[in-house]
Image: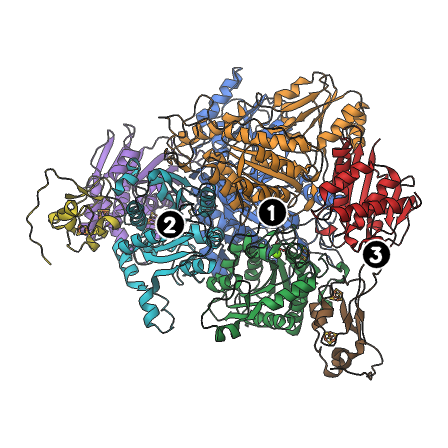
Chain colours: A purple, B cyan, C orange, D yellow, E blue, F green, G red, H brown
């Protein structure tokens, strides 16, 4: 099963790191194939940043996302530039505090930045919350793989904070589970 | 008034929140505006870098050239038509890394240009590599263990190379900077104004000035007025974490490209 | 008059008033002559700190509306590659003279070569086209340099005069006309955007200082001149236009001489080897031979190759190991004999005759 | 004249809050649609520029506008011009 | 792992201990990774003042016997042209990585392209040959970079890894072997002159400081290394040897993959477009199609084109307006379809399928 | 002794009769010989120009590179193997025209090199074009009406750019020059020795010093000892036709490429 | 009739100027065709300099000298490098004071440098003496053309000296004329 | 030690004639085979280097050899070594 996941938000939210972690989870810990790409450069600064991951069971040849089926959108501009055109059968997680519009596809609202600030005191981990929610809601990678990938990717000393964020993400996505 | 000089259809610009480049643009436009310059006789030239994007936001003829070469292009513009006012925006990397040779030669020839260097100690545009002005010990993506090379003192270099006007300020010193640009423009020959400024994204982030305000505070606190220091220091060396601001030279060596009336 | 001096005189006759350069053998006399002449004509001669700066300065000067030129040779030419790309992208009219010497590297500074013929077309990064001319007489040094300015202005691109040390340092008598034809760029119409093409794919030109407030950049840009470098469609349409404005007219602007269309053995030649070919074909009347002499090599006018219905083989004598012969090979299915020669000497007429004879006797040279 | 922050330009860097001698700029507390915490103005009428610009015929102080990296600060003409009565705190 | 990081890891695995570079998008991560890793291995990372200096520094370093590399992209590559010629002329082994972006000029700094494929072969002045590789996976970034060092040492010439932004910034899982094969230059035999070729046309190498007192120059030189730049025969034999040492073995060193020799429609591809071709040919099994995937593009192994007996047309999908397609055209008489695409996006599989279908239905794309 | 260091099979060299380059080579070889250096651990590097041909006559490993780039190549050699002694011969054109950027950066980094610049005020190799050191008013093939651009003071520039050792002598001052080379070599970091010297062919011919002896006399008479001037001048400016000789700086800023034992 | 003339000597003797003057005489004042070429560069310095002129009645296509029929040799090194291989039917003028060897072809000895010094006080005009002798001995261009070409080529103020040298050359070549 | 000018190297620039404190070098008067006016030596035994080099074990003065651009000046060993009696004129 091929998944094409698109992340977007503004610079500083860790959009690219999110994609890297997801790709790593799939490729290194779930033993599937993953290719991660991103939009670079100054035009992407200030404005919306974007990053994508393809996850597949067979080797990935054509490496570019054709039609994402999963979205993680963390800013209004990101939504406008990279989320608006989502196809109706896609699933989109949005940071509900930062994105004002809503897509036509399946939409899961996660108040990640707000929760990061209020519950964990650090809005910097909002992206990890979103990742947790993404995995909980879609199972695109296994929860264990995600956890391992997070541990392998975040700065020393912040592991606990990030795992908390991940678990918070799990919880926010499946509120009553 | 200054707003006339801007290409409003391109704003907001691509600079990160709190980037010093926008401030420096303001001061330069304020200066040319105070001098009553005509937009149609003014040309802005730049190389490549965040700083070098500035001319693209200004409503005049402009030349956004290749990395490091702004002064060579500007020399062509000015020497071919000395009646144009030619100003150059450049970065520490653009001016003093790849462009160092054009820099010293433009100083030597004393081409009648006004050059404003946005010295943020880093290559901002490419994401934060060390530059020839990165202070010893500071981290960047290419100096992960701290910069080990001595940085240039750009103002001193310009003086030794022959420029007629040389000054240094920071993006905090907006009024002094504006005045220096005016003074530089009014001095025939090559005028060089170095402006130390904040890059919160590429430099600040790795060196404890992630917030623009913290960076501005650092600039304000490290800057020492040259005049005052010269008077009081009795020849001691400035502590390495400080730098001098003020006018370094104003003189009248033979210059090139000075319009006839000037 | 020396070939290099004739180039300078051609430029002056065409109204060139700005020269920026850096000395290099065997092109230096072009600069030296401009240094002597321009100050007397209120023009500007400036010796820059290097070739990168020279190329930059002429682009800057060109945007003030003057005719600007530089001259160099191999090593300096290599250094100009980045800014040549900038001239292409910014559509700046300018003229470069390359008096070719033996390469690679420092090689043979004082010997003739035509080793930069592929470099002039492909030496800068990315996709682009340029116009390149090659003189085979001192007279052509004068005429083609003057013509280069017209082409540069008309097509808004860098135009190259690819001379070589033989022509550059040779002295021959030349005739200097009272005046030369001058075609300046078409003006930027009122209300037109500065990088919006007209029907000929070329935008009108307005100099700096004339109130049009043109933002010039080497980034992929829209018709206003604003950067738009992450838009694939914008890039594609811009770069294709830059190429097409030159390539689509390659047959109509071709500058060439054809001798003996009936020939079986056809020389394709340019620059100083033309003279040897003429000696072989015209003076020695070697049977069955003819030639295509290209004065404009790029864009390459491949249709001219089909003007020889009886051709059995094309022979391409060049002062390199085979460059334009590659281009010929792309377009024909008869044998293409690359008669490349390096080291600094011209092909002797006998050498070319020998190739023809070997071909005629069925051999493969 | 009325002091104004152009919300479409401001990126929320808070440099204006550092430099105004009157402390007119206060850090924003809520993000706008673009996610930016635009500072809010505390009694902007206190700004000498707002009060006196038209009288003197030139810009006064103006440090905030010079330092604002995003060209977001300006003074809009108010017509008819009426001097405000404000309490100035030194 | 990211493609750029894999290049750096490949270099480290091959024993590269010297990196000199200048940052440029989209290659910068290569330098950044070397900056982080080399100091820990007692290697030297140095950020130079520009790309000219970077190229110079690696040549200087290479003469001390270390493995040296730089990495850049279009504008920086253009600046390196002069010193690349010097590396060729002085027979200095070194490795350059070019992560290609959209040109000409500043163009599209963040978008992928393959627009420097002719430049790498012809971008410096004069006649010469080089070796150029192109990776299509992150794994190949690692492997081909390591291989580049072996080729550089074996042939004593600059070797280029022509990556592109897609591969450079893509992250894929790779397998890093415990060790990679390392082939160092053959030593300069006692009593042999430093530039006297052996049977393979390549002289033995001795590093500076080992007592051989080698005078290295970019001038045309004799076997001792002494300048001899006005001697045509010397120049000819030297430059021909420099070209021949690479070109004569082009078929034996070719690095490629051929799929479906029976194909009627054959893609010739390299770099990231290979992946689209594989998708079309292998996964979608588009009937009648096959491909030649070149990992080594220069020297061009034209005999491989004759491995497809049933070919009706070659299709060359490249991220440029047609570069390697020109080389294919030189060697075949069937139609060559240049499927160039610029702007930064890869060909979608459908686009290539459409070309095949149009060809099959007799149309001309 | 010095003769061992020469490639006798290449002599006589291509220099014109009376060219100062040969003299300077002698002094440098004398200096390394005095220091007891081993030929096999010594590398000479140069760019392109008459001056840059010098390494080709010396019996060591040598790198005759591209025009202006000697210091960048030398940086590679030295940083890759700091145990080698690396000396650079360069000309005024090579070093300060096309090579100016590498010059200031090598000074800034303070790479442990010894650089000898044969400053003959001209591009000799290409037949006598003006260089960045041609004095105002002097004629060359590209300044037929007299040079109008200010020349560089190379020694001052090296000081401002950060070199640890800077001196200037002339080809007349052979013993002082030899001592300066020794001192430069012994100072860790970048050592720069400018040597003003005669080019009778390309410069002298057009500027009334066609005879090597006349040129040498001019050099001797225009040179003013820096120490003496500093003591006696009370801050006046040196007359423009004179120049200072002597040691400009000797200091110990952080350096790169210094071998471990040093 | 095609003439191929080769000049050689050491730097400073005015070898190239000689060729330029001869070419100019033929092309501008005798109204024939002439192409002048030369050897350049530092290798030519110090050592022997060389310059050649082709003079012909029809346009000159192939511009390089194939086999010179006239030589003017003014130094021993010039002789060794560029004169030794003269074909037996060629004519060679040598500066007899400076060239020690003698060729196998027709050789005309002119003590140009010595005469320049003793008779005119300036050895710098030895090349003009040689030119005068060449023209007197071979008629490769007309005497009037040579005179005009010399006048057009030498620095202002030195015309008389140079014409004297030319005439001295005429006289030396045809001693008893 | 015997002072000697290598005729195959000397280009006749006469710099040696300018610098020798003993005026040992005199401008040449006749060209050699290569057309060079090589200086001739006037009582070269007076050179302190010729006299004392072997005694002191190092080169003395040596200015002529240092300034000679063509590496044409050298001292050859004479065996067996015999001090010369020379008249030294100061
Ligand atoms: C020839 C070339 N080399 C490298 C680059 C990549 N590059 C673009 S901007 C830049 C550095 C800019 O630094 P600086 O001038 O300090 O500007 P800042 O972004 O810090 O304002 C570099 C290395 C380029 N565009 N061209
Ligand atoms: C890139 C490049 N540009 C120009 C030249 C031509 N060139 C060779 S030497 C030289 C000038 C040398 O001047 P300088 O360094 O002062 O040496 P000098 O000959 O005076 O000793 C020039 C311009 C070249 N070889 N390469
Ligand atoms: S990266 Fe730095 S210099 Fe560039 S726009 Fe951002 S803050 Fe400014
Ligand atoms: S102009 Fe001065 S007083 Fe007024 S708001 Fe700005 S900083 Fe404050
Ligand atoms: S300085 Fe400008 S951009 Fe920054 S917060 Fe204030 S108004 Fe906004
Ligand atoms: S031209 Fe000048 S620098 Fe060159 S060798 Fe002759 S005298 Fe020396
Ligand atoms: S200094 Fe040397 S080259 Fe000059 S004349 Fe004396 S010996 Fe001869
Ligand atoms: S060493 Fe001194 S004294 Fe002896 S010959 Fe030379 S200059 Fe004269
Ligand atoms: Mg910067
Ligand atoms: Mg010089």
Please state which of residues C22 and E208 is positioned toward the viewer in this rendering.
C22
Q: Quick check: is the Cβ at mark 1 less than 8 Å away from ligand 2?
A: yes
Residue holding disc 2: B124
Between marks 1 and 2 in the image, the one whose residue lies nearer the viewer: 1
Residue holding disc 3: G118
The correct choice, above or below, for E79 with respect to C256 in the image is below
**Distance CA(mark 1)–CA(mark 2):** 36 Å
> In which chain is the residue bearing label 2?
B
Using the rendered view, name the quadrant where residue D90 is placed: bottom left
Q: Share a chain, discs 1 and 3?
A: no
Please state which of residues E290 and B108 is positioned toward the viewer in this rendering.
B108
- Number of residues whose C-alpha sits closer than 10 Å to that of mark 2, classed few (under 14), some (14–19) or many (20 or more): many
Using the rendered view, name the quadrant where residue E305 is placed: top right
**Left or right: where F53 falls relative to A10:** right
Q: Position of residue C49 (x, y in %)?
A: 53, 50
Residue holding disc 1: C23
């Amino acid at each position: 099963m091929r998944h094409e996941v698109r992340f977007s938000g503004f610079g500083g939210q860790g959009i690219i790191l999110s994609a890297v972690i997801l790709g790593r989870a799939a490729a290194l810990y779930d033993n599937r194939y993953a290719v991660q790409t991103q939009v670079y450069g100054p035009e992407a600064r200030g404005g919306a940043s974007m990053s994508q991951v393809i996850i597949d069971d067979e080797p990935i040849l054509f490496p570019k996302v054709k039609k994402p089926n999963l979205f993680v959108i963390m800013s209004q501009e990101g939504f406008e530039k990279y989320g608006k055109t989502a196809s109706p059968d896609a699933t989109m997680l949005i940071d509900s505090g930062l994105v004002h519009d809503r897509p036509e596809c399946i939409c899961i609202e996660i108040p990640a930045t707000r929760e990061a600030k209020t519950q964990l005191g650090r809005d910097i981990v909002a992206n990890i919350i979103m990742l947790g929610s993404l995995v909980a809601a879609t199972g695109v990678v296994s929860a264990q793989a995600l956890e391992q990938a997070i541990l392998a990717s975040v700065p020393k000393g912040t592991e606990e904070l990030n795992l908390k964020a991940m678990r918070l993400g799990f919880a926010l996505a499946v509120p009553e589970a | 008034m200054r707003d006339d000089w801007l290409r409003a259809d391109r704003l907001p610009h691509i600079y990160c929140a709190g980037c010093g480049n926008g401030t420096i643009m303001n001061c330069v436009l304020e200066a040319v505006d105070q001098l009553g310059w005509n937009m149609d006789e003014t040309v802005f030239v730049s190389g490549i870098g965040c700083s070098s994007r500035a001319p693209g936001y200004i409503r005049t003829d402009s030349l956004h050239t290749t990395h490091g070469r702004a002064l060579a292009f500007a020399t062509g513009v000015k020497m071919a038509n000395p009646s144009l006012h030619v100003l150059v925006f450049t970065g520490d990397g653009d001016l003093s890394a790849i462009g160092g040779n054009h820099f010293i030669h433009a100083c030597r020839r004393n081409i009648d240009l006004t050059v404003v260097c946005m010295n943020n100690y880093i290559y901002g545009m490419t994401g934060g590599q060390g530059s020839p002005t990165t202070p010893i010990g500071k981290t960047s993506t290419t100096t992960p263990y701290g910069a080990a090379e001595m940085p240039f003192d750009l103002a001193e270099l310009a003086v030794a190379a022959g420029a007629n006007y040389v000054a240094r300020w920071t993006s905090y010193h907006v009024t002094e900077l504006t005045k220096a640009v005016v003074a530089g423009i009014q001095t025939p020959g090559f005028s060089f104004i170095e402006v130390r400024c904040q890059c919160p994204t590429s430099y600040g982030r790795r060196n404890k000035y992630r917030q623009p305000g913290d960076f501005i505070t650092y600039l304000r606190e490290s800057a020492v007025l040259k005049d005052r220091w010269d008077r009081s220091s009795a020849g001691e060396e400035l502590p390495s974490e400080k730098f001098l601001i003020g006018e370094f030279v104003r003189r009248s060596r033979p210059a090139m490209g000075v319009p006839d009336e000037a | 008059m020396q070939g290099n001096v004739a180039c300078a005189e051609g430029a002056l006759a065409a109204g060139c008033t700005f020269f920026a350069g850096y000395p290099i053998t065997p092109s230096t006399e072009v600069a030296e002559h401009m240094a002597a002449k321009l100050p007397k004509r209120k023009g500007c001669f400036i010796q820059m700190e290097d070739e990168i700066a020279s190329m930059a300065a002429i682009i800057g000067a060109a945007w003030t509306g003057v005719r600007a030129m530089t001259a160099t040779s191999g090593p300096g030419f290599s250094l100009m590659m980045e800014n040549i790309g900038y001239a292409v992208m910014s559509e700046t009219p300018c003229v470069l003279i390359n008096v070719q010497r033996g390469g690679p590297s420092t090689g043979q500074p004082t010997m003739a070569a035509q080793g930069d013929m592929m470099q002039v077309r492909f030496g800068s990064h990315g996709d682009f086209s340029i116009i390149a001319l090659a003189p085979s007489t001192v007279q052509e040094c004068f005429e083609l340099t003057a013509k280069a300015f017209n082409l540069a202005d008309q097509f808004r691109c860098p135009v190259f005069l690819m001379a070589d040390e033989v022509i550059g340092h040779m002295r021959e008598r030349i005739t200097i006309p009272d005046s030369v034809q001058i075609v300046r760029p078409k003006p930027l119409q009122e209300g037109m955007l500065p990088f919006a093409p007209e029907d000929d794919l070329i935008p009108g030109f307005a100099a700096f200082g004339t109130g049009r407030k043109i933002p010039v950049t080497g980034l992929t840009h829209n018709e206003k001149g604003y950067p738009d470098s992450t838009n694939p469609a914008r890039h594609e349409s811009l770069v294709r236009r830059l190429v097409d404005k030159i390539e689509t007219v390659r047959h109509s602007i071709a500058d060439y001489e054809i001798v003996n269309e009936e020939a079986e053995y056809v020389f394709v030649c340019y620059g100083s080897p033309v003279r040897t070919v003429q000696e072989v074909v015209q003076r020695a009347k070697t049977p069955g031979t003819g030639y295509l002499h290209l004065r404009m090599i790029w864009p390459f006018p491949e249709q001219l190759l089909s003007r020889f219905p009886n051709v059995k083989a094309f022979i391409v004598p060049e002062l390199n190991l085979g460059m334009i012969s590659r281009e010929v090979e792309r377009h024909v299915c008869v044998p293409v004999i690359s008669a490349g020669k390096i080291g600094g000497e011209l092909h002797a007429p006998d050498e070319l005759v020998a190739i023809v004879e070997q071909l005629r006797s069925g051999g493969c040279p | 004249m009325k002091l104004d922050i152009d919300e479409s330009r401001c990126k929320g860097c808070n440099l204006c809050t550092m430099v105004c001698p009157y402390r007119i700029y206060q850090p924003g507390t809520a993000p706008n649609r673009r996610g930016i915490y635009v500072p809010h103005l505390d009694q902007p009428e206190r700004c000498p520029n707002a009060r006196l610009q038209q009288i003197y015929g030139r810009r006064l102080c103006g440090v905030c506008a010079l330092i604002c990296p995003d060209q977001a600060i300006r003074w809009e003409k108010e017509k008819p011009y009426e001097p405000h009565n404000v309490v100035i705190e030194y």
